């Protein structure tokens, strides 16, 4: 039998097992053992492989030259495209929309609600997951099916750069990964040097989404961006994503108010109108309420440096005019 034919048999077995489970949950363990053993015996992915430690601290056996990759988060998809390795991608998650070509690839569900059957049907020789969002249950099930799964955890700029280097190594794109990271480091250092010239650090409130009023605490990359861009995060503190009332924000008195949202047009105009009523807030009084693309700020990718530069131009427009 050919490898392709054997993989097709594995997929059929998986579908059968999945349906069988719903009819007879008492045979769950036995049925899954059959599926695991069968898939393990026919999977070709580990013929030539190497062992790596992922960012979850797990030892993972990764194919030397993975050709069928399923990305389990939009940020991972974006990194693979940035490395010019998109030809290896056979599946992505919902909202993988940057670059535009990514949205044309087969979807395996959202990164928090993954469709295991679709993933298996794509016959991946490697899945790349994220610790922050992907359900651990699905990761363990993919492991049990002997599908290699490499987990990343890029929670700040330094770790994003490490993730790019790590994925670049797996995909034999070391030089491209190094070039991306060097460019990121140069641009971050440029922002840092300009911030040193700032006479003060304005107070910044960063609103995530439209409703409820959620901001970013100290253990987030948003806090890191605000600080690097020369601002003071009024939501700093141990809670990653604290909630606030309008009255609490009035007391905080931010100089700059930034809303990270996918909302545009009329919806954002309504939000601005709502905040316009709170004229005692310095940011409102001085017309320094801004909206930014949530994808640019939320995703741990090379574009996070674009977000840093944009934030810097909003906080210190005079210093960062050249970065616009």
Image (tube, helix red, strand yellow):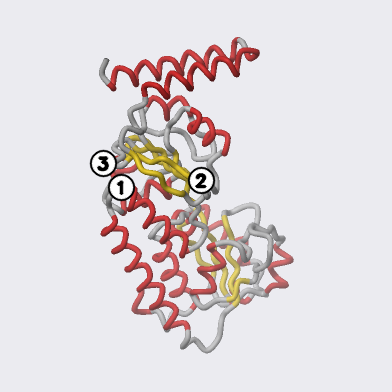
Residue 294 placement (x, y as % from top left) = 48, 55
Q: Earlier in the sequence, mark 3 or mark 1?
A: 3
Q: Label 3: which residue? A: 87
In what element is the residue under mark 2?
A: loop
Of the two numbered discs 3 and 1 in the rendering, the one whose residue sits closer to the viewer: 1
How many residues crowd mark 2 within 10 Å: few (<14), some (14–19), many (20+)? few
Q: Are marks 1 and 2 in contact (CB under 8 Å)?
A: no
* x 28%, y 50%: residue: 172
Q: Earlier in the sequence, mark 1 or mark 2?
A: 2
Residue 206 versus residue 47 in the image, above or below: below
Q: Quadrant of residue 12?
A: top left
Distance between the Cα atoms at labels 2 and 3? 27 Å
Residue 194 placement (x, y as % from top left) = 42, 83
* x 34%, y 39%: residue: 49
* x 33%, y 18%: residue: 6
Q: Earlier in the sequence, mark 2 or mark 3?
A: 2
Instruction: Name the foreground residue: 229 vs 147.
Output: 147
Q: Label 2: which residue? A: 58
In what element is the residue under mark 1?
A: loop
Q: Label 1: which residue? A: 171
The label shown at residue 246 is none
Q: Quadrant of the N terminus?
A: top left
* x 43%, y 46%: residue: 74
Residue 129 placement (x, y as % from top left) = 46, 43
Distance between the Cα atoms at labels 3 and 1? 11 Å
């Amino acid at each position: 039998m050919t490898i392709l034919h054997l993989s097709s048999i594995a997929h059929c077995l998986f579908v059968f097992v999945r349906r069988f489970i719903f009819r007879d949950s008492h045979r769950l363990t036995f049925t899954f053992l059959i599926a695991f053993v069968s898939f393990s015996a026919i999977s070709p992915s580990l013929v030539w492989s190497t062992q790596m430690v992922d960012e979850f601290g797990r030892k993972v056996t990764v194919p030397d030259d993975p050709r069928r990759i399923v990305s389990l988060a939009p940020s991972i998809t974006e990194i693979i495209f940035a490395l010019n390795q998109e030809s290896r991608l056979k599946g992505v998650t919902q909202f993988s929309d940057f670059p535009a070509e990514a949205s044309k690839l087969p979807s395996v569900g959202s990164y928090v609600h993954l469709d295991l059957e679709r993933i298996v049907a794509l016959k991946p020789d490697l899945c790349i997951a994220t610790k922050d969002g992907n359900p651990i249950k699905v990761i363990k099930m993919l492991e049990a099916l002997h599908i290699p799964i490499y987990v990343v955890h890029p929670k700040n700029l330094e770790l994003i750069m490490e993730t790019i280097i790590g994925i670049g190594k797996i995909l034999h794109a070391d030089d491209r990964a190094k070039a991306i990271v060097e460019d990121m480091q140069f641009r971050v250092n440029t922002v840092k040097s300009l911030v040193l010239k700032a006479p003060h650090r304005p107070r910044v409130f960063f609103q995530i989404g439209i409703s409820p009023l959620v901001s970013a605490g100290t253990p987030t990359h948003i806090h890191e961006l605000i600080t690097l861009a020369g601002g003071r995060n009024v939501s700093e503190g141990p809670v990653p994503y604290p909630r606030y009332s309008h009255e609490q924000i009035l007391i905080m008195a931010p100089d700059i108010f930034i809303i990270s949202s996918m909302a545009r047009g009329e919806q954002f105009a309504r939000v601005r109108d709502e905040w316009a009523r709170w004229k005692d807030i310095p940011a409102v009084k001085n017309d320094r309420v801004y909206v930014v693309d949530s994808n640019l700020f939320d995703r741990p990718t090379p574009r996070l440096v674009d977000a840093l530069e944009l934030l810097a131009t909003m906080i210190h427009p005079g210093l960062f005019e050249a970065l616009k």
